[in-house]
């Protein structure tokens, strides 16, 4: 870990990881040693937003006995560590389509799941600094508008009028989508898990999957340290660990982990940066900012960050973050970084997720690799996975760009609006 700059903040801390109080003990499993075997219709590996959403949608459609096996606790992976951003602003159709469907779930979340996920629709503002970025922004806005998204390209003057705390002297504009915002990923994920349980899903925590046994035709059973679960359908929803799980099974799932650090400031006056400020992304400087309670949540990444499972906050980024943040928001000169956390992006080569059957292995599916934007796409991705399993194809959205085959065929359209 790089030494922390002496002037910046106190000890790094991660958000708490606690299991949901609704945890159900499944008496026939995990008590009898590794020779225990039970039967299910669907086994899902991983209880992050993807796993619980898939389980919920399968249970809604009465897909039989659904078992989720989670190594740690519900929402203990990347989902709990996400910034909660929900945005329509993508350069490719699939990202926009997925948000168009998911955002409806987040807007009506309390009705469906009985929990307020704190969805704050203060918009997303993505800043534009170069002529090349401006061209790309124009194309993005045209595509997003053609798909029904409320988004506009703002001039530097308009940005300055609406957000006077932003320095626009080196900007050519910014794209703003008012319906976007951010919600609380832990609340959302655990609420979906709780509703899935009410519908009969069994979520077994502390249950690491160590292998999947295959027959000539397809999947047969899932192996854990406590026992086995036989099932004709197995869904890999293991987030950044999906590639590793693929290796255990002998299939290539091109998902690799990349660490991403977030920094929180001490309370910052709302008369300088209002509570309703949008989620601001400055791709050119590689930083982001939104309100987090009384303070601010600041993000920064390294473009050359090597793949690793490290979740040590990268305090070496604090200095460039402060410098760039003050450049864009001069008032931040008075802000104090008080803590940081770090989680894993689950990157694919084209920075787009996977919702797919595994070619050649009957009954095996993958829902993973959303490359740093999976929280927002979790609700619709789970629904699409249920359609794929139960109907043989997804009908709500054309998911061809999410298929595993694209990697082997080299048919990839890289999503540039991924902030790594
Ligand atoms: C700092 C940060 C900020 C982010 N900000 C945003 C954002 O603003 N908006 C957004 O949409 N997304 C954001 N993301 C991305 C988002 O968090 C992920 O895309 C999403 O949470 C992935 O969900 P998942 O269910 O695939 O993975 P996870 O939430 O990681 O869940 C996978 C689960 O699988 C379990 N598991 C792994 N291996 C095994 C095994 N062998 N057996 C059993 N269980 C296993 C893990 O314990 C874990 O609980 C951010 C991510 C980070 C790190």
Image: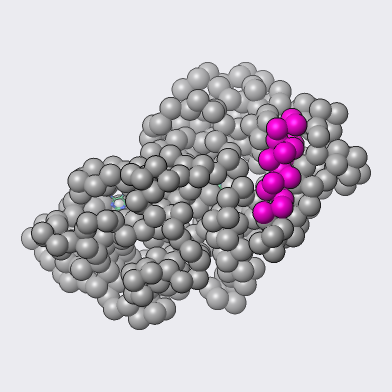
Residue occupying the point 68% across, 48% down: 140
Q: Residue 418 location, x and y as percent?
A: 57, 42
Q: Which residues are magenta?
A: 126-143
Residue 143 visible in the picture? yes
Is 128 one of the magenta-colored residues?
yes
Instruction: Choose top left, top right, bottom left or bottom right for residue 258.
Output: top left
Q: Decide: is 128 above or below 381.
A: above
Q: Quadrant of the C terminus?
A: top right
Q: List the single residue furthest toward the bottom.
A: 62
Q: Residue 411 location, x and y as percent?
A: 43, 46
Q: Residue 217 location, x and y as percent?
A: 14, 62
The way the protein has been coloured in the rendering is one colour
Marks counted in the figure total 0
Residue occupying the point 65% across, 51% down: 89
Residue 47 visible in the picture? no
Q: Residue 224 location, x and y as percent?
A: 19, 55
**Residue 135 or residue 312, whichever sits in front:** 135
Residue occupying the point 35% across, 51% down: 404
**Residue 346 or residue 392, whichever sits in front:** 392
Q: Decide: is 402 above or below 255.
A: below
**Residue 372 or residue 202, whichever sits in front:** 372
Predominant SS along the magenta part:
helix
Q: Is residue 26 left or right of residue 17?
A: left
**Residue 148 or residue 340, whichever sits in front:** 148
Q: List the single residue furthest toward the left.
A: 35
Residue occupying the point 39% across, 42% down: 410
Q: Decide: is 14 above or below 228.
A: above
Is 336 one of the magenta-colored residues?
no
Instruction: Choose top left, top right, bottom left or bottom right for residue 240.
Output: top left
């Amino acid at each position: 870990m790089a030494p922390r700059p002496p002037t910046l903040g106190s000890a790094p801390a991660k958000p708490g990881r606690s299991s949901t109080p609704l945890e159900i003990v499944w008496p026939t499993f995990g008590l009898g040693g590794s020779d225990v075997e039970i039967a299910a219709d669907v086994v899902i590996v991983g209880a992050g937003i993807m796993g619980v959403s898939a389980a919920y949608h399968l249970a809604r459609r009465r897909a039989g006995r659904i078992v989720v096996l989670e190594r740690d606790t519900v929402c203990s992976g990347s989902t709990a560590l996400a910034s909660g951003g929900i945005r329509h602003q993508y350069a490719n159709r699939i990202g926009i389509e997925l948000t168009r469907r998911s955002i409806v779930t987040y807007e009506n979340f309390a009705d469906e799941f009985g929990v307020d996920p704190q969805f704050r629709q203060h918009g997303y503002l993505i800043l534009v600094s170069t002529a090349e970025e401006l061209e790309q922004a124009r194309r993005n806005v045209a595509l997003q508008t053609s798909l029904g998204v409320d988004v506009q390209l703002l001039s530097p003057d308009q940005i300055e009028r609406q957000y006077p705390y932003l320095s626009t002297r080196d900007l050519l504009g910014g794209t703003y989508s008012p319906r976007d915002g951010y919600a609380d990923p832990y609340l959302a994920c655990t609420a979906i898990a709780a509703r899935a349980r009410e519908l009969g899903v069994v979520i077994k925590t502390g249950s690491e999957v160590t292998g999947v046994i295959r027959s000539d035709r397809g999947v047969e059973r899932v192996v854990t340290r406590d026992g086995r679960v036989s099932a004709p359908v197995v869904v890999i929803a293991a987030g950044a660990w999906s590639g590793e799980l693929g290796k255990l099974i002998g299939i290539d799932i091109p998902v690799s982990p990349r660490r991403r650090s977030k920094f929180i400031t001490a309370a910052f006056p709302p008369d300088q940066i209002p509570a309703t400020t949008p989620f601001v992304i400055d791709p050119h400087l590689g930083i982001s900012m939104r309100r987090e309670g009384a303070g601010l949540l600041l993000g920064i990444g390294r473009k050359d960050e090597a793949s690793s499972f490290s979740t040590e906050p990268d305090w070496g980024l604090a200095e460039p973050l402060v410098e760039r943040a003050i450049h864009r928001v001069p008032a931040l000169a008075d802000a104090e970084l008080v803590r940081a956390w770090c989680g894993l992006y689950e990157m694919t080569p084209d920075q787009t997720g996977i919702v797919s059957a595994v070619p050649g292995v009957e009954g095996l599916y993958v829902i993973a690799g959303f490359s740093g934007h999976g929280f927002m796409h979790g609700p619709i991705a789970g629904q699409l996975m249920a359609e794929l399993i139960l109907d043989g194809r997804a009908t709500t959205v054309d998911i061809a760009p999410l298929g595993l085959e694209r990697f082997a065929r080299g048919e990839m359209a890289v999503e540039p609006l991924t902030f790594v």
